[in-house]
């Protein structure tokens, strides 16, 4: 059952229940009032007829008593005189009034001619009973019951119609979102139409806005994945082609000299190493944006110091480290990866023996080298995936390292930056948290490209 039907039926049920409840109260109140009027007419008979008169003279005809009937019974309960068209026995309450002056009882009695309201008044030689048929009262109450039932049906129908209209308006956005979700499931397309009407400022409107945002985020993610696959396929093609070529040479020329064979094997190892590095970086980029590593409070300067020590031991390259205590909340592994990428980049582009400079402070990490620097036209693109300047294509690498740095910085609410250093070389780094990135100078650039 759809939500619209549930809301419509719920409103109809509430309306019917409310109408029946009100009708039941009205019915009971009306019944009590009608019975009270009948009882009052029976009590008024005492003023019209003296109690002692009955039993000595014949009872008056029914007409003068305005529809009332009467009978006289003795102390044994025998009927002496009666204008009732039907007979009815005495019950315990009636018998209790026999022979007792001024003792009374009033109650409803069922007879073959319908219900009667009977008032019994005791006197010395028995009791006088005055009664009135409740046929007219029953007809009024029966009509009232019919009207209550009819009004309940009418009110329930109107409530169901209003409920359907209200629920249709309230669930319009939900139906549109459901159709869009089914279309996405059926076609895999994320550019579904959610309608041009502005979202209302209610739960359904906020859900529509959130759904639009979710589809937009999914579309961007899908586009990024497609672009990553395309770029990765392009970059993987070069080392694979080189590997295939060297293997073909080994297969076609089995009589190669040991020196030539050793050179080809060396090239193969180098290509395999570059290919392994490229695959690792592709995996890092593909999974980095959705890393579920918990963020912890850590000393950024101490974390960078660990990476710097490891690089110094592994490369024997001199690194000048300037540090100031800096505490941040970050993903330890991701930040270590970003610092490693910065050091790899600096050592790749600075083959000299000059020391690499690393500084940490104010939530920022800066790595400088004395290489050729970055061309002005490339400053705005160095953080793009797989981007490599023309002068750098002869160097090993995939063009993913700095894009990893940018992704880590953005995931931590910061940004990556790159600029040329006075006297030659480049300085590349990132900021974390709410600290602003370094102010750009005339020869620097702060790219904000999305990864």
Image: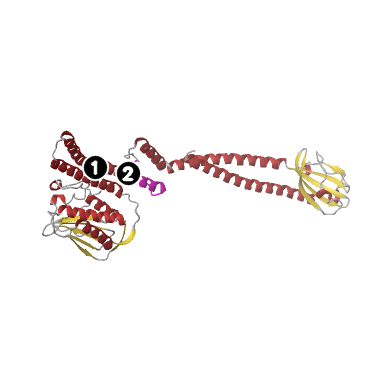
Instruction: Characterize the local packing of mark 1: few (<14), some (14-19) or many (20 or more) Cα atoms within 10 angstroms.
Output: some
What colour scheme does the image use?
Answer: secondary structure
Q: Would residue 210 be counted in the magenta stretch?
A: yes
User: Number of labelled discs?
Assistant: 2
Work out whether residue 105 or residue 343 is closer to the camera in this orientation and state it.
343
Mark closer to the chain start, 2 or 1:
2
Q: Which residues are magenta?
A: 195-217
Q: Would residue 244 be counted in the magenta stretch?
A: no
Vertical order, 142 against 434 (above or below): above
- Residue 190 shown left or right of residue 275 in the figure: right
Percent position of residue 223, x then y: 28, 42
Work out whether residue 220 or residue 119 is closer to the camera in this orientation and state it.
220
Q: Which mark is on residue 181?
A: none
Instruction: Characterize the local packing of mark 2: few (<14), some (14-19) or many (20 or more) Cα atoms within 10 angstroms.
Output: some
Among the 4 quarters of the image, the one containing residue 58: top right
Q: Is residue 259 visible?
A: yes
Percent position of residue 324, x then y: 24, 66
Q: Which mark is on residue 218?
A: 2
Work out whether residue 81 or residue 249 is closer to the camera in this orientation and state it.
249
Vertical order, 198 against 351 (above or below): above
Q: Measuring 55% from the left and 45% from the top, which residue is drawn there? A: 14
- Residue assigned mark 1: 232
Q: Measuring 22% from the left and 58% from the top, which residue is drawn there? A: 313
Percent position of residue 138, x then y: 70, 41
- Residue 286 shown left or right of residue 349 in the figure: right
Q: Is residue 50 visible?
A: no
């Amino acid at each position: 059952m759809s939500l619209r039907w549930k809301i419509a039926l719920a409103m109809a049920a509430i309306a019917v229940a409310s109408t029946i409840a009100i009708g039941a109260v009205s019915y009971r109140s009306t019944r009590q009032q009608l019975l009270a009027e009948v009882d009052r007419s029976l009590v008024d008979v005492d003023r019209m007829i003296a109690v002692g008169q009955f039993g000595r003279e014949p009872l008056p005809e029914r007409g003068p008593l305005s529809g009332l009937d009467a009978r006289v019974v003795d102390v044994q309960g025998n009927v002496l005189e009666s204008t009732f068209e039907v007979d009815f026995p005495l019950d315990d309450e009636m018998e209790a009034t026999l022979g007792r002056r001024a003792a009374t009882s009033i109650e409803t009695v069922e007879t073959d001619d319908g219900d009667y309201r009977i008032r019994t008044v005791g006197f010395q030689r028995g009791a006088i009973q005055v009664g009135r048929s409740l046929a007219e009262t029953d007809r009024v109450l029966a009509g009232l019951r019919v009207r209550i039932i009819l009004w309940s049906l009418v009110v329930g129908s109107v409530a169901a119609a209003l409920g359907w209209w209200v629920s249709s308006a309230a669930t319009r956005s939900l139906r549109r979102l459901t159709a869009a979700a089914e279309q996405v499931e059926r076609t895999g397309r994320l550019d579904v139409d959610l309608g041009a009407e502005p979202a209302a400022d209610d739960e359904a409107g906020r859900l529509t806005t959130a759904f639009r945002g979710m589809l937009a985020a999914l579309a961007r993610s899908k586009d990024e994945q497609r672009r990553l696959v395309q770029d990765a396929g392009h970059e993987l093609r070069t080392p694979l082609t080189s590997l295939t070529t060297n293997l073909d040479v080994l297969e076609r020329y089995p009589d190669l000299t040991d020196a030539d064979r050793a050179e080809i094997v060396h090239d193969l190892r180098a290509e395999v190493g570059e290919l392994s590095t490229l695959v690792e970086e592709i995996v890092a980029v593909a999974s980095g944006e959705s890393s579920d590593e918990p963020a912890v409070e850590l000393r950024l300067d101490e974390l960078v110091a660990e990476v710097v020590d490891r690089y110094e031991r592994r490369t024997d390259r001199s690194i000048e480290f300037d540090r100031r205590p800096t505490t941040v909340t970050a993903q330890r592994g991701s930040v270590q990866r970003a610092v490693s990428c910065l050091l790899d980049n600096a050592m790749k582009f600075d083959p000299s023996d000059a020391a690499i400079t690393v500084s940490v402070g104010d939530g920022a990490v800066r790595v400088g080298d004395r290489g050729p620097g970055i061309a002005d036209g490339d400053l705005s693109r160095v953080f793009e995936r797989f981007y490599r300047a023309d002068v750098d294509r002869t160097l090993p690498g995939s063009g993913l390292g700095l894009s990893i740095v940018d992704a880590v910085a953005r995931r931590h609410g910061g940004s990556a930056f790159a600029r040329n250093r006075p006297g030659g070389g480049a300085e590349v780094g990132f900021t974390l948290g709410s600290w602003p990135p370094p102010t750009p100078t005339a020869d620097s650039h702060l790219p904000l490209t999305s990864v």
